Every structure is written in C-alpha cells, then in structure tokens.
Image (tube, rainbow, N blue to C red):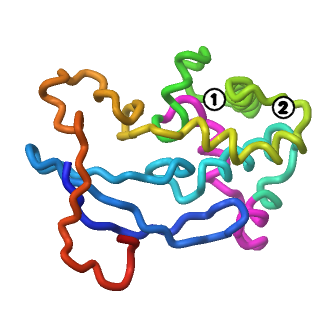
Amino acid sequence: MQGHGFYNRQVCGLSEGWILIWVRRYVCRDCGHTMSRLPDWLHPWRWYAAAVIIEALCRDLILGETARAIGVRFGRSSDEGEWRSLRRWRTQLLVSPSLWGWLGVRLGVRAAASSREQGRSHLMRFLGEMNMNPGLAVKVLAELRAAVRATLSGLVHNRRQAWLLGRFRPGTARAADSGSTPMALPTEKDSGPGPPG
C-alpha cells in the first residue's frame, strides 16, 4: 500500500455539528485499488458519526422522542418532515456492513428490523454488547460516544464485510494479500494548504 493523497468529506459529529474532515487514501501498488482510512468514529458511506446514529436510535427507540426533535438536535431544520435516515438506521442496525453488521450474526440478528419493536430489540442487543444498561437512558447517552467508538476501533470495512486492521481480509490467502504489510508513503512532494501531512 502506498499513500495516495487525501479527500475531504462533511460529517455530523456529536458536539461539533457539521464538520469537514480529511480522509487519507491509499493505493495498492499490485492491483491499483484504492482504500481510505476513516477515523474510528465514522462508518463508511455515512454522513453522521457512529455515535450520532446510536444516540439518535436511543432517543427514538428507548426515550420515545419524535423523529423531528431528534433531527433538530443533530442539525436538521424543524420544518423538515420525516427523517428517513433514522428509519433506515433502525432497519439496518446489526445487518448492514456499515452499521455493525459484523456483530449481527454473533448477536443472533439475521434479518433487518421490520418494525419499531424489532429495531428496539436490535438496539438492546447492541447496547448489551457494549455492556451498557439501556434502562439508564440518560447515563447510556453520556457514555455512548466512547463505547461506540470502541466498537469501530481498528476495523477496515468494505460494502460487504468488516475485519480487524492487521488481519487478512476474509477469503484471501496470506501470501496474496497486498495489505499484509501496509506502508504509508505519501505520493505528494508538497501537499500545500489543505489536508494534514
């Protein structure tokens, strides 16, 4: 692997609101595929930080707050209607690779939640995996950021799977995996203003 520059993306964090982050890119010198190293608090292909997603689900499924109130809390206009992302997260939690799908099988979740009650059940299993008592909702929300971040630490994702960084991608032979000894060599001589060096 070789450094291949940076790109920026907009993300909604917990306390920061909407922020612009720089994401490091790498290219495989053998096959030419690129990959990015996201911060451990962000899922791929998501606009919202992982802790925002779980807090929103806790507020929806445990505290019973309205989707509109939850949306306003995370920067949406109070004039906007239904927050489709919230419903999608509720459905995809522990099933989608980009919403802790790798934990679903171990926690006994084999299908997407088709109702609010199933979504609540999936969320309770997820919180239990983090050793959090969902009955103490306010305390859960206070501890949420660190616990959610710990679930993503050291993981590499693609659209179908997630695996620990430093281990080989599922289904690949050790000798054939070009990511077995990653090297980060920047390709830019002078990146100039913009992303960190």
Q: Position of residue 39 (x, y in %)?
A: 49, 53
> 4 left or right of 94?
left
Looking at marks 2 and 1 on the same chain, the residue that comes earlier in the sequence is marked by 1
In this view, the residue farthest toward the bottom is: 193
Discs 2/1, front: 2
Mark 1 belongs to which amino acid? Ala
Residue under label 1, please give it.
Answer: 113
Q: Position of residue 112 (x, y in %)?
A: 57, 28
> 140 left or right of 194?
right
Residue under label 2, please give it.
Answer: 134
Of residue 72 and residue 149, the one placed in the foreground of this image is: 149
Mark 2 belongs to which amino acid? Pro
Cα gap from disc 2 to disc 1, whole angstroms: 18 Å
Q: Secondary structure at mark 1?
A: loop
Q: Is residue 120 above or below residue 147?
A: above
Give the extent of the magenta segment.
71-96
Q: Hey, which quadrant is residue 48 in on the image? A: bottom right
Q: Is residue 111 above or below residue 35?
A: above
Q: Is residue 119 above or below residue 196?
A: above
Q: Hey, which quadrant is residue 16 in on the image? A: bottom right
- Residue placed at 83% from the left, 53% from the top? 66
> 107 left or right of 171?
right
Q: Is residue 76 inside the magenta stretch?
A: yes
The quadrant of the image that shows the C terminus is bottom left
Q: Is residue 83 inside the magenta stretch?
A: yes
Q: Secondary structure at mark 2?
A: loop
